[in-house]
Image (tube, rainbow, N blue to C red):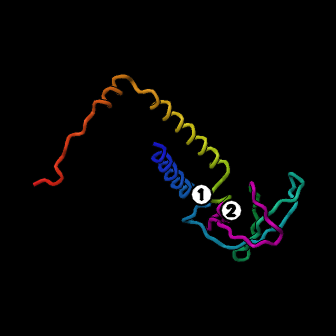
Amino acid sequence: MYKTVIILYIVVFCTYILFSRQPDYFDGEITTATIHWQNDSIQHQAIPKAVFTIGKDVYAFDARYILRGLAENKIVNIIYEASNPNKAAVYSWWGYWIRAGELAASIILLLVLLRIAIVLNKNPAAESLKEQMEYKPEKKKRYNS
């Protein structure tokens, strides 16, 4: 039961990840950007911004993410939508493909569903248990002739 549930979880989670990323992996363009620490006007603190150029236009976006440190002048790969380059993201496993909130929520959901499955199957009804104990598989011929 555990193996089936965990395999199903991994397949569903990977499918969800593949088709829910923004900017879209299949339609997005991948290029490089340079990290520059700039002062944020709202929070009044330095934050890493990824700066990239498309043609003659220069774009910058917030490149912060949980447990990811970016040094000044570091070159990173980014993914952006050609129709709206302002919506870009640093293209990496941690932050683009795997996000902390989604990972935590899906693991909690997996544990809750496993717990529900265990509770439902832990104490079967007496009739069901008796039926399972009396079951004898019928002998089948190996080859039909």
Give the x, y percent position of residue 93: 64, 62
Label disc, if present, on residue 89 of the rendered structure: 2
Give residue 41's quadrant in the image: bottom right
**Above or below 41: residue 79:** below
What residue sits 52% from the left and 52% below the top? 10
Q: Is residue 36 left or right of residue 120?
A: right
Quadrant where the N terminus sits is top left
**Above or below 17: residue 29:** below
Q: Amino acid at mark 2?
A: Ala
**Disc with the residue nearer the chain's start (2 vs 1):** 1
Can you identify the residue that label 1 sits on? 21
**Above or below 52: residue 121:** above
Q: Is residue 89 magenta?
A: yes
Give the x, y percent position of residue 12: 50, 50
Q: Is residue 48 left or right of residue 18?
A: right
Bounds of the magenta segment: 66-93
